[in-house]
Amino acid sequence: GENVEQHPSTLSVQEGDSAVIKCTYSDSASNYFPWYKQELGKRPQLIIDIRSNVGEKKDQRIAVTLNKTAKHFSLHITETQPEDSAVYFCAARNNFNKFYFGSGTKLNVKP
Amino acid sequence: NAGVTQTPKFRILKIGQSMTLQCTQDMNHNYMYWYRQDPGMGLKLIYYSVGAGITDKGEVPNGYNVSRSTTEDFPLRLELAAPSQTSVYFCASSYSKRVNEKLFFGSGTQLSVL
């Protein structure tokens, strides 16, 4: 099956700085890569996603990049705010429509 | 639309007891999933379904069973509960592989086995 690795496990930044979270995947047939934000005690919420035929996607302060050759993708958050503090998960979807998740990154944005 | 609805929200079981976690979606999604999330960890796929009558194992299926008799419902059955099954369980659904592929989650069921 697919194996998704995510780094770092914790990330602490100053408000206004940028944050980058990186993921790698093992199955070259994976074709869709969503990112989720999970606040304490809540369900994961989709924040951005990218398909395998696209290299980069932006949505305001959030961007995702994908390198299919290297099988890695990254989440970039610019101008971080305290409300960005949460756990972020990357995921990869394989050809059978199964979603596999990374282990999560706890982002702490210090005011 | 209510989206993906899970019941119950919380449950405490004794070792050896059985229970069914309910999941229903009203978005006419073909694909449904069960994940478990242990404290401070990511989500692990237990079972998934591509449509009524079709289910398949995920990464951690042992100790669980599922059924999918309708498009809307995808219950997860725990037989002979063990402390290792203490976790938060999330049900999720998506429409298809090609369009509207986003994965939507229910609000979760927190299960403790004591």
Image: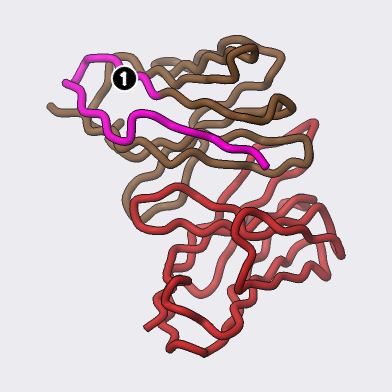
Give the x, y percent position of residue A79: 28, 15
Q: Which of the 4 image quarters holds residue B38? A: bottom left
Q: Colour of chain B?
A: red
Q: From what the image shows, is residue B104 above or below residue A77?
A: below
Q: Which residue is identified by label 1? A: A19
Q: Is residue A42 left or right of residue B36?
A: left
Q: Which residues are magenta?
A: A1-21
Q: In the rendered structure, the residue with mark 1 lies on which chain?
A: A
Q: Nearer the viewer, residue A13 or B63?
A: B63
Q: Residue placed at 45% from the left, 37% from the top? A: A89
Identify the image's colour scheme: rainbow, by chain, secondary structure or one colour.
Answer: by chain
x and y percentages locating residue A83 in the rendered image: 27, 33
- The question of residue A11 being in magenta is answered with yes
Residue A26 lies in quadrant: top right
Q: Residue at x 58, y 37 (%)?
A: A3
Shade of chain A as shown in the rendered figure: brown
Compared to B14, does A44 lie above or below? above
Which amino acid is tagged 1?
Ala
Q: Is B80 situated above or below B34?
A: below
Is residue A66 magenta-colored? Answer: no
- Classify A76 as above or below A1: above
Q: Residues within 10 Å of mark 1 (few under 14, many from 20)?
A: some
The residue sitting at the left extreme is A111
Q: Residue at x 12, y 27 (%)?
A: A111
Q: Is residue A41 left or right of residue B98?
A: left
